[in-house]
Structure formats: structure tokens, C-alpha cells
Image (cartoon, rainbow, N blue to C red):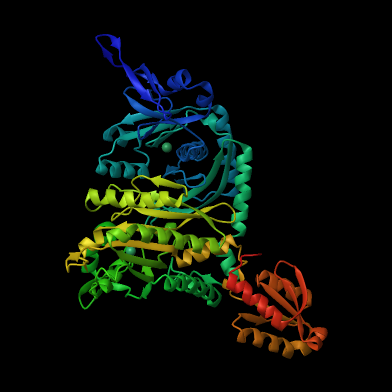
Amino acid sequence: MVEYIRGIKMNINIKLPDGSIVSTESGISAKDFIKNNIGEGLLRSALAIKVDDRLMDLSCSLDKDSNLTVITYKNEEGKEIYNHSSSHIMALAVKRLFSDVKFGIGPAIENGFYYDFDLKSSFSEEDLKKIEEEVNRIIKEDLKFERFEIDFNQALEVFKDQPYKLEMINDIKEKGEKLSYYKVGEFTDLCRGPHLESTGKIKAFKILKASGAYWKGDSKNKQLQRIYGLSYPSQTELKEYLTKLEEAQKRDHRKIGKELDLYSFQEEAPGMPFFHANGTLIWNALVDFVSDKMIKRNYEINKTPIILNQSLWLQSGHWDHYKDNMYFTKIDDQDFAVKPMNCPGNILIYKAHQYSYRDLPIRAGEFGLVHRHELSGVLSGLFRVRCFTQDDAHVFCTKEQMKEEILDLINFIDEVYTTFGFSYHMELSTRPEKAMGDPQLWNLAENTLKEVLDSTKKEYKVNEGDGAFYGPKIDFHLNDAIGRTWQCGTIQLDFQMPEKFDLTYEGPNNQKIRPVMIHRAILGSVERFLGILVEHFEGKFPLWISPIQVIVLPIADRHNDYAKEISNKLKENGFRVDIDKASLTMNKKIRNAELRKINYILVVGDSEEKNKTINIRTRNNEILGEKDLDSFIKDLREEVEKKSIKN
Ligand SMILES: [Zn+2]
Ligand SMILES: [Zn+2]
């Protein structure tokens, strides 16, 4: 579309990320613009463009003054376009091989992509191999992705044989959004885009696995066949990722949890973990660790009910913003809700007091069990659950104390994470569309968080529009031993909740003043954090949180009494000990102890009994040799106190 004024082509101004402004004729394709004004080099790696805030295809034309960014694989958005385009290519391959297939959705995910297919039977290994081969053929064919914009009725016609697409078209119509579709080869998909220019841009492709998945993740719906795939701009990158994936599978907390008898999942309560004795020991150690630090920081630790009257949730705003994820029940004909968050309960405790400015800040913690309804399709071990314990706290303070409190929270979180050897980064999320409250307060809240973050001199990322409905937040993302990141901690400023619940404190002149409320969690979910630790340490826990710290292995039955004596003394000193009296060879017993990832293995036989010593080895097959028990206990105590993460 070229705009003319009295027959003369109009010029438009395109601003580039470096601030320079290029004047060009309206209607030029993005591709030509990049070639002429930025360079062939960048054009080769370009996957799409961003015009102002909108991602678009390289083939689109520029027709108004705008900011332009070239998107490459280096950008998260570029990776997503790359992966999502691969899902279309895979769908085309499936269409060629299974003509009666109906298509679900095919989004990019954190690593790779998937596509859901409705098919009479599930995919066999042989099928997956054929699909992969077909994808490679399509890549060689270098087919173009073409975009078409259509109205509602046209969409109904184009997708008349695709029931899932028709359902989506009707959903989109309800939202009043525009419709578009993309065509690659013989495959047409309802899609917002953008996409790669052509299939040849994909350099490495692999199908990972197929599994069942409910339409829209809801077990009430039909089960579709989902294929997960990976694509990369080079074979090397694909290989690197596969190595990482293998490492992650070795560390899978569901597998290790079973091996170490930590927790299980039962059909009787989907998405709600059952903690076994060993898992509970770790769980308690984590809660104690954070509680001790809280007490040192002048926190009070509360405990509030799990079921609270519905009126409270209406007042808090959770009803409006969160009710789809809440569980409800009736008691004495009144409506109650199972708490998805601990805030309202702790607000009621605040309101049970009459605080003056001298009492503030009130730092109220709670290890609160919350329930949040997640669709069955998304549940995943301890990482995505329906109930968990939040290591929650709410700080009620004056506006003047806000900065100091936030800075202290950042330091607190830093202390906890570094104890486990995690590095981390912070992200600031600002006002979302569905925000509640006065924009001026939002600005004050956002600026306060920014100022504190800047003062730490640590780098942080800003996520525009990603804040909670009641205030902006800082999220903490920690990096584990194999380079994955996990969002755990959060600090959220809130001027809304004190308003809704009419919270006050008494000022110096007896006037009523509104406190500021800060929500914070450090571990986030204790259960999920525990799962992350299992994967991070591969089940080889640091001594202080290890469910069984020491095992004593008597060489022969006649050493059982001495083994018992050693074990008792260790227990008296507060350590968690086991004895293996099985009649197995010593090698087998050592191997078993290593598999149970018990930190220290003590072998006792004739010479140890005579010398009143023990023979120490570690789960990593290091032999530390003979030692007397007292000095071993001293070493253990030191290792626990330091919360050492060696091994
Ligand atoms: Zn698409
Ligand atoms: Zn809260």
C-alpha cells in the first residue's frame, strides 16, 4: 500500500534502535528497507521486525512513521518466531502423511514447540520418524510462509473442516480481535504471526516425543496427540541442547523423589504432593532455616485458616481477579473459599491490633498452605501443583520506611539463595492492563522499586505491564547447576489492599494514616523450591538438609552392637543416622548407601571396634579413612553450621 499526495510518493521516518532516523518512501518492504539502510549482514540473520510494539513479517511494508527493530534469533521474540514457525512446518508434514488429521494449536514453548493433533490413533515411533523426515524435506523445499488477513465469515469458510480452529475463531470473534491466517505449502493455519520468510530458515530440526494432551488442557475435553519438537539455527546448538536435556532428565525431581523416597503423587489428590518422611525432613529444614532468619529480622510468624468466608475474597479483589483459580465450599449455608493467598488472613490479624507509628514496620510472616486450581493438563511434579506452602510475609510500613524495607528484603533473599549456591537476577514488573487503583500511586510504587533496585548496583530487567493487579513487583530468578532459571522470590508493593480493608495506624498527632503493604516470598512455594533443590543438587543434598546424613555399615553381624553404639551417639548429637545390617557384601552395602546419596558412610569392623574409631567414606567414593567419633562429630557439626554446599 503506497500513499500518494497529488501523485508524489510520501516519505515516512523510520527510527532505529540507535536513535537514528531514516527517511524512506512509504510502502517499502521491511526487507528492502533493512537491505538499503541497515545492511545485508543483518538482513541475513533477520527473522522478523518489530514496528513500534508490534511484531511483523519481513515481507510486510512500512507505511507510517514508526520505530523499527530487526528481530533475530538472539532476541527471545526471535526464538519464539523460529520455534513457532517450526510447529507449522511439522503440522504440514503431519498433514501430508495423515490426510484426515484435525489441528489443535501449535505454540512455541520455553524450549522448542509442540503441535496438538486430533487423529484416530496415537503416533508410533515409526510415525514420528517419518514426520521428521518429511519436515526435513519441507525445509529443503524452502516453502514461503504467506500471510492473509480475513474477516470472520471468510475465516469460517477457510477452516470449515477444522472444528478446533472454528472454536478458536468464535473465541476470537468474542474478543473482537482481527483474524489472519498463514499458509505454508498445503497447510493453512489460523495465526496472528509473524513467521519466518520460508521453511529453509530452519537448520536443525528434531522431534522429541509424542504424548496425549487434552484440548485446552482440560480433562473434560477430548484428548489430542501432542508432538514436541526442537529447532535451531545450527546442528551444534541442537546437540548442545540435547546434552542439557539429558542432564535435566537425569536430575528430574520426580524420578529422584521416588528413588530417595521423598514424596509421591496419588490419583486421590491430583496436583497435591504427598510428602514422605524423608521429604518432610527437608521441608522442615527449609522452613526452619527461613523462620530463624525471620526471627532475627524481627518478624512475627502467624498462622491463619485455610477456609475463609467468600465476602473476604470479594473485599480483597481476589474474587474479581482470581476466582477461576479458587476452590469453594459451603458451610452452614454460607459460601466460603479455600485461600489461594495468605494476604487477607494476615490483614485481619493486623486489624486485630491498634498500631501506632512507633510500632511500624510490622513484619508478619506465614508459612501458609494455599490452593490454586490448575488445569490437570499442566500439572507437573512439584513444579506445577494445586496446593503448596508459600513462605509468605507481609510488611506493613509507613511510606517513609518503604525503601529501607525493600532493600532489606532484597538482602534477605540474597542471603537465602547464596546459601544454596544459586546465582540469580531480578526483574521489575510494572502496571498491567487489568490494574486496580490510582495511577499516581502506581507511579510512586514503580519509582520506589526502581530507586531501590538502582541502589543495589545489581543489573535487573524491566517487564512492562507484567505486575500484579494490586501493585508492581520485583521477581527473583535463580540459576541452577545446569544453567536453567527458576522464578522463586517476589517483592510486591501494594497500596490497594490497605485501602480496601481500611488499614490504618495512628500518626504522631493521633491522626489515622494508611500503611503501605509489601507482599514478599523468598522460596516462593516451599514444595517447588524443594523440587528445584533436588534437581540442582541431583539429590546429593548439603549435609544440613540431607534427610539421612550418615549411615553405619557393620562388616559382620558381630559388629552390629558397635554400629548401634556409633549410631546412638550420632543421634544424641542431633544427626540423622541409619544402620545397614543386611547380610550383603560390603561393596554392595557401600553401593546402596551411595545410591541413597547419604553424605557419610561409616564402615565398622574388628579394628574400628578395638580402636574405638570409624572408617569414613563419602557418597562420592572418597575415602576419608579412620577417625575417632568425637572428631567426626565436630566436623559434622561444623559442616551443618556453615551450611556448607561442598560435594
Ligand atoms: Zn503461526
Ligand atoms: Zn500477600
Number of residue marks: 0
Q: Residue furthest top?
A: 7
Q: Is residue 126 left or right of residue 82?
A: right
Quadrant hosting ligand 2: bottom left
The quadrant in which residue 553 appears is: bottom right
Q: Position of residue 17 (x, y in %)?
A: 42, 30
Q: Would residue 16 be visible to someone looking at this image?
A: yes
Q: Is residue 4 left or right of residue 459?
A: left
For the residue pair 398 and 201, the one nearer the viewer reads as 398
Q: Residue at x 50, y 21 (%)?
A: 39
For the residue pair 476 and 260, the one nearer the viewer reads as 476
Which image quarter is the C terminus in?
bottom right
Up-down relation of residue 96 to residue 214 (above or below): above
Q: Residue at x 76, y 83 (%)?
A: 613
Q: Position of residue 128 (x, y in %)?
A: 57, 45
Up-down relation of residue 513 to residue 203 (above or below): below
The quadrant in which residue 616 appears is: bottom right
Q: Residue furthest front?
A: 508
Q: Position of residue 15 (x, y in %)?
A: 38, 26
For the residue pair 493 and 513, the one nearer the viewer reads as 513
For the residue pair 266 and 394, the one nearer the viewer reads as 394
Q: Residue at x 41, y 48 (%)?
A: 454
Q: Would residue 549 be visible to someone looking at this image?
A: no
The quadrant in which residue 480 appears is: bottom right
Q: Residue at x 82, y 86 (%)?
A: 606
Which image quarter is the N terminus in?
top left
Q: Position of residue 506 (x, y in %)?
A: 21, 69
